[in-house]
Every structure is written in structure tokens, then in C-alpha cells.
Image: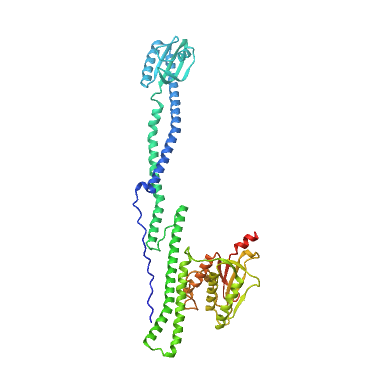
């Protein structure tokens, strides 16, 4: 009967809920802008706290120097000998200084021409000494520059600092500070968009992966964290594509293996129903149908076992096991089966017990599966060997179980995928005798659940070698300790 193409139907389940609508205040862009603005604001405030006092002191020093220069000029003018010339120039200078918000005090014979100057300043100038600094003049803090003149005379210039350097500095700094804050906000916006762009790209790629697009790839670009994210997503996409491809091939292979015995059973059943099989051929037909049904039952059992291997309730009953005795029990079964097809069977085991801690039924299932795989591929006359030995000198180290054969063996590439479901079946189907591709995967899963390790390699007999390492008895470990 012609085979019908097999299609792997997708599993339909509740899809992931749609992402909530984003609000700008909750986006990375908004938060990055806010953080950058906050940093810029703090930087501006710190700069202002440091720069403004320095600028004010610098401005006050400049004002003091300028006031001192004007005080020297006023003193030079008032030293003119001709009285009329001195008074005319002095009046003109005083008017000019007052237009610059500078107060002028004239001291004659130890007395100021008007009130407001501190008495200490007047006495110092009258005594012939200059004055420079800050004083309280007329109830306000002011810059003071006094110059002594001959005969107890003098001139004192003052400038109030009430609306002086602080106001000037602040008026000159607010625009640069505001520009710095605006630049911080703009830089934060660009930075946030630069940081958020690869995240948005990765989110879009993840959504496409979720939708089933396995060809999606994320461009790899700096910085290193973004490149690592891109590598991870690209690796995930490649791994999903590979896994789904293998799963598809595995399902096709399993469906083919299931269809083969079903086709034979159906064909013989139709022949029996149509009465085309003679009476003396009925027993042979029944045996064929029985054999095919047993084959089908093994396939279904292997599939169920594989499906249950990762379940938490997978039944295991570990305990102390003598691997030497297990090998002897297996030999009684497999010696006759191998002899029936012309394959010599040999057991290599020490005389002393080899202790391990495992589930005896499950490890026997692993051994039988490995021996059945070996018997399927070895030609008549090639050996099949079951070997048992301790894993170390310590009795608590556990034991090793090895199945070797003289069959075609594996290449180094085969060893890398030997325990993947259906990998070898797909590779060698139509080339040599192969099974369903489930046996080695099932054996590897069982050994892993038993706490052991299984490896594949090359056998000295020329074929494949499978080595199972089983843990030791924890009771022996505690006793030896």
C-alpha cells in the first residue's frame, strides 16, 4: 500500500498575552532622560556652588582694584597746589564718581565733610595712612579706599556691595547654567534612544521568534553588552531552528516506523478477512502478526518512556546492585539470542562482586536496549561483549557496565549525536540496519535519571562501545568514612 505523507501538526495552546500598552513615563527613554536631567541639574548646582563664590570674590577684587585706582586718581587731583584749579577738577571728578555709584568723602583737618564714614577710617586717613578693604558705611557693607593727603587731609571712596558682584555674577551665569541643563536633557534623550534601540530590536526579534520565524537575526553591534544580547538571541534562534528540524525529522522517522508494522498487520488482516490465506498458512500468518504487534508495542512503550523520563513522578527504586550478578543474568538470556543468528556473545566480569547503587530493573532495561542495538547491526561471526568492572579501587566508587560489538561502529561525528533522538536513524536509514532512533536516547535518559553517565566510543572489536558509569552505594561510602 502506498505511504501517505506525514505532517507534524503544531501544538495549539493558550498563546502569550499581548504586552501592556506602554506609557512614556515607564519607558527606558523617559527614565534615561530624567536621570540625565537630574545628573545635569546636580552638576549645574555643584558648579554654581563652587563657581559663584569664586566669581564673586574675583569680581570684588576687580572692583577693589578699580576703586583703589580711582582713589589714587582723586588723591592726585586733590594734591594740585592752585586752589581754584584743584577745586574745579575735584568737583568734576566727584560728579563723575557719583555717576558711577561711588561715594566720595573729603577729610579736612581730621573731620569728614559728611556723616557715614566709620570713625576708625577717618582717624586712620587723618593720621596719614591709607585704608583699603570692606567696612560698614552708612549702615551698609561697602568697599572702602582711603588715601591720605598732606596736612591731615584725605579722600575716601566707597562703593556699596548691596547690588554688586553677586547680582552681576548671577546675571552672567544663569544663561550658561540653563544651557548646560538643556544640553544635558538633549544628551539624555539621544543616549536613551541609543540604549533603547537595541532593546527594542531584541524585543521585536523575540516576538518574531515567538510567532515562529526562525530566520530572524539581530545585528551584532557595540557596546559589548548589546553584542552579547544579539549573540544570545541569534544563538537561541539557531538552536530553536535546529531543535525543531530534528523534532520534525524524528516525528517523520517515528511515523514511518509505526506505519511499517501497522501496514504488515493490516495487510495480513485483510488477507485473512478475504480468505486468501490457506488454512495451513494461518499459524505462520498469526506469528507474523504477533511479531509485528510486539514491534509496535515496543515502539509505543519507548515513546511513552521517553515522554515520562523528565517527569518528576518517573518511578525509580534505587538500591544496592551487584553488577557481576546482573551481567550473569543477562548472559543467560542473550547467549541463546546471539547464537540463534550466529553472533558469539561474551561476558567479561571479575569474580568478585561489583557494587553499585541503582534501580536493578531500569539498569537491566538499559543493558538490554544496548545489547539489542548491538545485535541488530553486527554481522554473523562478529562478537558482542558485555563487560563489568569497578569504577575505582574504592568499593564505594561505583561500577562500569560496557557493551561492545564488532559491527560497523561509529564515526567521530556520529559519537557527538549518538544519544540524540532519531539522529543516527536519520543519518543511516537506507544505508545499514537501524532501529527507530529511540533506544539510545532512552538509555541515555534512564542513565541520567539514575545519577550515572553514559558515553559512546570505539570498541577494540572494531565496532561501537557504550560505557555506563553508575554511582556507588552511599552506605559503603559512610562506612568507609
Measured along the vertical axis of the image, is residue 383 above or below residue 352?
Answer: below
Q: Is residue 341 visible in the rendered structure shown here?
A: no
Measured along the vertical axis of the image, is residue 168 above or below residue 322?
Answer: above
Nearest the viewer among 179 and 445 is: 445
Q: Is residue 215 found left or right of 472 in the rendered image?
A: left
Identify the residue at image location x=38%, y=37%.
178
Nearest the viewer among 90 and 25 is: 25
Q: Is residue 456 found left or right of 287 in the rendered image?
A: right
Question: In the displayed image of the protein, which residue is found farthest to the top?
Answer: 109
Nearest the viewer among 46 and 402 is: 402
Q: Where residue 152 sits in the image (x, y, percent)?
A: 46, 10
**Quarter residue 288 falls in:** bottom left
Nearest the viewer among 272 and 250 is: 272
Q: Where residue 139 sits in the image (x, y, percent)?
A: 40, 18
**Quarter residue 215 falls in:** bottom left
Q: Is residue 370 visible in the rendered structure shown here?
A: yes
Measured along the vertical axis of the image, is residue 118 above or below residue 293?
Answer: above
Q: Where residue 362 sits in the image (x, y, percent)?
A: 53, 69
Quadrant (top left/top right/bottom left/bottom right) for the C terminus: bottom right
Q: Where residue 244 sits in the image (x, y, percent)?
A: 42, 67
Identify the residue at image location x=60%, y=64%.
473
Measured along the vertical axis of the image, is residue 384 above or below residue 480?
Answer: below
**Quarter residue 353 falls in:** bottom right
Quadrant (top left/top right/bottom left/bottom right) for the N terminus: bottom left
Amino acid at each position: 500500500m502506498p505511504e501517505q505523507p506525514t505532517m507534524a501538526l503544531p501544538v495549539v495552546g493558550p498563546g502569550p498575552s499581548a504586552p501592556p500598552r506602554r506609557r512614556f513615563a515607564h519607558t527606558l527613554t523617559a527614565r534615561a532622560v530624567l536621570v540625565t536631567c537630574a545628573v545635569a541639574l546636580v552638576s549645574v548646582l555643584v558648579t554654581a556652588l563652587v563657581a559663584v563664590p569664586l566669581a564673586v570674590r574675583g569680581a570684588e577684587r576687580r572692583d577693589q582694584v578699580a576703586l583703589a585706582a580711582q582713589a589714587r586718581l582723586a588723591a592726585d587731583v586733590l594734591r594740585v597746589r592752585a586752589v581754584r584749579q584743584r577745586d574745579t577738577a575735584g568737583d568734576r571728578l566727584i560728579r563723575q564718581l557719583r555717576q558711577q555709584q561711588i561715594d566720595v568723602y573729603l577729610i579736612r583737618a581730621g573731620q569728614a565733610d559728611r556723616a557715614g564714614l566709620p570713625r576708625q577710617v577717618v582717624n586712620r586717613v587723618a593720621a596719614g595712612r591709607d585704608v583699603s578693604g570692606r567696612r560698614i558705611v552708612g549702615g551698609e557693607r561697602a568697599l572702602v579706599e582711603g588715601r591720605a593727603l598732606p596736612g591731615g587731609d584725605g579722600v575716601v571712596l566707597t562703593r556699596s556691595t548691596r547690588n554688586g558682584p553677586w547680582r552681576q555674577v548671577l546675571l552672567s551665569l544663569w544663561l550658561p547654567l540653563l544651557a548646560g541643563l538643556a544640553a544635558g536633557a538633549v544628551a539624555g534623550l539621544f543616549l536613551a534612544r541609543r540604549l533603547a534601540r537595541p532593546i527594542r530590536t531584541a524585543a521585536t526579534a523575540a516576538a518574531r521568534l515567538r510567532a515562529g520565524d526562525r530566520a530572524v537575526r539581530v545585528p551584532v553591534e557595540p557596546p559589548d553588552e548589546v553584542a552579547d544580547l544579539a549573540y544570545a538571541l541569534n544563538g537561541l534562534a539557531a538552536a530553536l531552528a535546529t531543535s525543531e528540524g530534528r523534532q520534525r525529522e524524528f516525528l517523520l522517522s517515528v511515523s514511518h516506523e509505526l506505519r511499517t508494522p501497522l501496514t504488515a498487520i493490516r495487510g495480513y488482516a485483510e488477507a485473512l478477512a478475504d480468505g486468501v490465506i490457506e488454512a495451513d498458512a494461518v499459524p505462520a500468518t498469526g506469528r507474523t502478526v504477533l511479531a509485528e504487534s510486539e514491534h509496535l508495542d515496543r515502539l509505543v512503550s519507548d515513546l511513552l518512556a521517553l515522554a515520562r523520563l523528565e517527569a518528576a513522578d518517573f518511578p525509580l527504586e534505587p538500591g544496592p546492585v551487584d553488577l557481576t550478578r546482573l551481567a550473569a543474568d543477562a548472559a543467560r538470556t542473550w547467549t541463546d539470542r546471539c547464537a540463534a543468528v550466529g553472533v558469539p556473545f561474551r561476558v567479561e566480569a571479575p569474580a568478585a562482586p561489583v557494587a553499585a547503587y541503582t534501580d536493578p530493573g531500569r539498569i537491566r532495561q538499559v543493558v538490554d536496549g544496548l545489547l539489542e542495538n548491538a545485535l541488530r547491526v553486527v554481522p554473523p561471526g562478529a562478537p558482542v561483549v558485555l563487560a563489568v568492572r569497578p569504577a575505582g579501587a574504592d568499593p564505594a566508587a561505583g561500577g562500569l557496565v560496557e557493551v561492545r560489538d564488532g559491527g560497523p561502529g561509529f564515526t567521530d561525528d556520529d559519537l557527538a549525536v549518538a544519544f540524540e533522538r532519531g539522529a543516527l536513524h536519520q543519518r543511516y536509514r537506507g544505508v545499514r540496519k537501524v532501529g527507530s532512533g529511540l533506544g539510545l536516547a532512552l538509555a541515555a535518559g534512564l542513565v541520567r535519571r539514575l545519577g550515572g553517565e553514559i558515553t559512546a566510543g570505539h570498541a577494540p572489536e572494531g565496532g561501537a562501545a557504550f560505557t555506563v558509569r553508575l554511582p556507588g552505594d552511599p552506605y559503603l561510602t559512610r562506612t568507609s568514612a
